[in-house]
Amino acid sequence: MTEGPARVLPAKAEHRDDVRVIRDLPPLRLPKYVVVQIGCAPQVPAEIAADLRDRGVPAGLIGYEYQPLTEATLLDGIGESAVVIFGSSGLFGRLGVDVASRRVVHIPKIGSATARHVNRNLETFHRCVAAVIDRFPFYEEGEEDRFEEVADELRQLLDTLDDSAPAHSGLWETLCDDVAMGDYANWEED
């Protein structure tokens, strides 16, 4: 797979400001599974900080679905107890490790008290990210008839790696829904 700058754009703008926001996002390289090390703020629990240091985090997913932060931070009052935030998701979301359960969770926006399940732990998150990147590109331009088929293939792949991954309104379900709508048909190299 060739590396180079690329853009992922939605099939259509949903809001008036989407075009401006999307236009201002910098181009991203074609995805490649790589692990990076990030720092941890002092308040991050020692066991989770050690896990993040030892395993690292994926360097990204596809587009802005997930990008790592440079430093993990603790967010109190989310999920079962608190969440150690290690990445961003989209424009406003965050990904992190729930301190009590060690599950990887998605917080849809800053200030939200909702933590949606992503994976049962950091290791399965790594495996799911690697598998989705390995399957990319999902389809070619003009293959509209394959959108739903490819989304179903991704759902099965993710379910095989972590049967908890296809959680309702979770990161992976949303990604598969976007694939089914054709949001990844216009990945263009600049």
Image (cartoon, grey):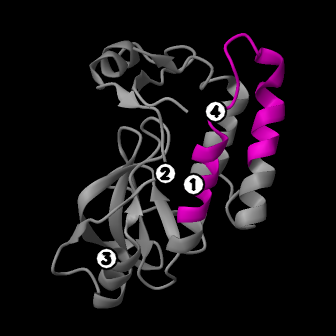
Q: Does residue 170 appear anywhere in the picture? A: no
Q: Is residue 121 left or right of residue 140?
A: left
Q: Is residue 29 left or right of residue 130?
A: left
Please identify the quadrant where the C terminus is shown: top left
Residue 53 image label: 3
Q: Which residue is mark 1?
A: 130
Q: Nearer the viewer, mark 3 or mark 2?
A: 2
Report the residue at 67% width, 48% height from top: 173
Disc 4 from disc 2: Cα separation = 20 Å
Disc 1 from disc 4: Cα separation = 18 Å
Residue 33 image label: 2
Q: Are marks 1 and 2 in contact (CB under 8 Å)?
A: yes
**What is the span of residues highlighted in magenta in the rendered image?**
126-154
Mark 1 or 2, nearer chain start: 2
Q: Nearer the viewer, mark 1 or mark 4?
A: 1
Disc 3 from disc 2: Cα separation = 17 Å
